[in-house]
Amino acid sequence: MQQHRNRAVVLGASIAGLLAARVLAEHFRHVTMIERDPLAPTPRARRGVPQGAHTHGVLASGVEILERRFPGLTASLVEDGAREGDIGLIGQFIVQGCRIQKCETGRLGVVVSRLRLEHELRDRVLGLPNVEVHQASTATGLISTADGSRVTGVLVRSGREGVNGGSTEAEIGADLVVDTTGRGSRTPIWLRKLGYAPPAEDRLDIGVSYTTATFSRRPDDLDGDLYRVVGTAPPNRRVGVAVAVEGDRWSVTLAGYLGSKADREPQGFAAYARHLAAPDIYELVADREPLQPPITMSYPTTLRRYFERLQRFPEGLLVFGDAMCSFNPIYGQGMSVAAKQADALAYWLNRGQAQRSARRFFVEAARVVSPAWELTVGGDLGFEEIDGPRTVRTRLVSRYLTRLLAVARNDADVSRAFLEVVNLTAPPQSLLHPRVARRVFGARQRTPHAGHAGPSSGAVAVDNREGEQASVTGL
Ligand SMILES: Cc1cc2nc3c(=O)[nH]c(=O)nc-3n(C[C@H](O)[C@H](O)[C@H](O)COP(=O)(O)OP(=O)(O)OC[C@H]3O[C@@H](n4cnc5c(N)ncnc54)[C@H](O)[C@@H]3O)c2cc1C
């Protein structure tokens, strides 16, 4: 591999930063990562990644790319207690009250805790001979040429004020700076300082809260499945996700939209699960104690920054991961989209110099962000209370999706098509393909039953604690 460029600096050493460093290491002699947190030698939650201890799903698209970038990753995780299998067979989705039929997809799924995954990636990236990390170091600004047209490095503060003689600030020069500092990224502010406009943003106020607990796992829980996702069924605002993680544990998250929130006290936690759109997760947690007290996190708004629309942008700077788009976490997309952006970065780096403008990267990156963003926005707008761009098209697509979900209960082909889209291995438009649409419109719709989505029930009426009966009927 030719490493004809000298130094790349990556800001942030979470999932997106690690993926960026992995790709950059093939193109630069030195890759320097700047991470604000001190990094522990074992999988451990840390301040800069408050979501780290919450349940994380890796989509099949993400697994595919991670395995390609880090050969043997899955085997190594499995050796340490993670599990793998066909994503359509090892677990089940229940969406809008419809229990999607299990089916073979040929796509590999891996269930593992986020902390273990990040730790494994970090070990591998820092094991590369040309990658180093400055931990407990904060990027505080950009350095540029006098006219501001090119970023040439970063300002980094190390140590903490007043601790061991106080902090120091230093400049680190770079041919390329990649900002992966997450949704709190300061690039929009730094751009202003350099005389550039910040990117336009889209936000959706979704008022999501996360409450997560771990439980010990018995082999016959959920009939031996390794994950269960019970999605919302508007107006029911509750979501439940259970993922079997290493150490024979369940990581269980109960999430709520628009201010709905599970209790941190164990009995209240289980009581919240009782009013999910299906009983699976309640039955899983009802009679067991969490291994540690549940933890919580708020996620008030989604955020997308449109760097690709900027007319002017300095060369030598890229932004990726949550710093570009912070998705509603309920859809489990962030890490897999970061993996896709790493592919976009590799593609960009392999282009000739003349075609390597920052704008070109942002256009490539937006190509992988857009389908995921549209999927989540479409889902979130299922709640009338959430403000957002509702058009005739989005309403039609939403009605079509409701019908498709109802059909996917009993039709493996439709179920597979749905799982491919949810896993970002196929674009959302593939659900409109005549092969799928014929089955969606050809199927007879059943009348909803009252109660939860039982193991083989059809479309259902959903009881929810917010006090309404929501009927999910298809068209
Ligand atoms: C509650 C929740 C649940 C989620 N569940 C899923 C899921 O199931 N599946 C999934 O794929 N994704 C999920 N996500 C999203 C996922 O966590 C992120 O997409 C993923 O971590 C990639 O983010 P990132 O690396 O871009 O940024 P982050 O993970 O936010 O990391 C940013 C890093 O930058 C560091 N940093 C910040 N500022 C500075 C600075 N000035 N200088 C140096 N370092 C700095 C931070 O310490 C941190 O290490 C979830 C998110 C949340 C909030």
Image (cartoon, helix red, strand yellow):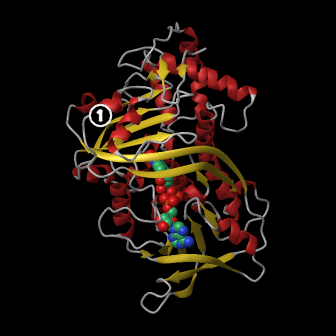
Left or right: residue 168 versus residue 202 is: left
Q: Is residue 292 visible?
A: yes
In this rendered view, identify the residue nearer to me: 382 or 310. 382
Left or right: residue 465 versus residue 388 is: left
Count of numbered marks: 1
From the top left corner, tell me how far across and down residue 412 is, in percent. 42, 19
From the top left corner, tell me how far across and down residue 427 is, in percent. 57, 35
From the top left corner, tell me how far across and down residue 433 is, in percent. 59, 23
Task: Please name the residue shown 63% across and 38% down the image.
Answer: 377
From the top left corner, tell me how far across and down residue 211 is, in percent. 42, 46
Task: Please name the residue shown 60% across and 47% down the image.
Answer: 369
Q: Residue furthest left?
A: 219
Task: Please name the residue shown 39% across and 47% down the image.
Answer: 264
Identify residue for label 1: 286
In this rendered view, identify the residue nearer to me: 312 or 169. 169
What SS does tag 1 mark? loop
Task: Please name the residue shown 23% across and 40% down the image.
Answer: 217
Q: Amino acid at mark 1?
A: Ala
Against 433, is 78 above or below? below
Left or right: residue 192 versus residue 223 is: right
